[in-house]
Image (cartoon, rainbow, N blue to C red):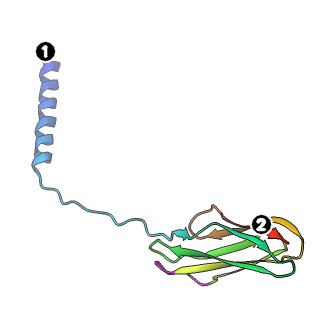
Amino acid sequence: MKRFFTLAAFVGCIAILAQAQLSTKFTNYVTSPALSPAATWETLIHEFGEIEQGTPAKHVFTVTNSGTEPLILTKVKPSCGCTVANYTKTEIAPGESGEVEATYNAQKMGVFSKTITVLTNVDDQATILKIRGEVK
């Protein structure tokens, strides 16, 4: 019986404390989103269609920093020596855009599909840009 009264007293105290918590006015704090860059690409694939042999084909991929901290393109690597990539090497401020210019050396006739791997300070995952076409 003593245990029953002890348990009842304990439950009663918890109920009183819970009621006191509910009636206390709390201030809502909205935490700001995590500060980080975010890369938003205009497109990831470019189709050249038919291009003339011996004439380099260029395309500019545009990336916008939709985050809250500077975006940095840390490494840009084409899949082969037939493609050259120039890119924005300075920090890209929030709301601003940068570029990766891919130039394909159209010396070999036929269909081609090449990639450019882009690493940024957003995360450890690479973004793969693709260029495709046919040299006539």
Quarter residue 56 falls in: bottom right
Q: Amino acid at mark 2?
A: Lys
**Which numbered marker is on residue 32?**
none
Rendered image: mark on residue 114: 2
Image height of 70 relative to 123, above or below: below
Relative to 113, 64 lies left or right = left
Q: Quadrant of residue 74?
A: bottom right
Q: In front: 8, or 130? A: 130
Q: Position of residue 55 (x, y in %)?
A: 82, 82
- Give me the residue at 15% from left, 41% from top: 18
Corner quadrant of residue 8: top left
Residue 75: x %, y % from top left? 69, 73
Q: Which residue is mark 1?
A: 1
Residue span colored magenta = 90-96
Foreground residue, 50 or 40? 50
Q: CA distance from mark 1 to mark 2?
A: 82 Å
Circle 1: is it few (<14), some (14-19), or many (20+) Cα within 10 Å? Answer: few
Residue 102, image x, y percentages = 72, 77
Element marked by disc 1: loop
Dot 2, crowdedness within 10 Å: few (<14), some or many (≥20)? some
Magenta region, mostly helix, strand or loop? Answer: loop
Outermost residue to the top: 1
Q: Secondary structure at mark 2?
A: strand
Q: Residue 80, position in %: x, y?
A: 83, 69
Is 135 placed above or below 124 here? below
Task: Tell me which label, 1 or 2, sits earlier in the chain.
Answer: 1
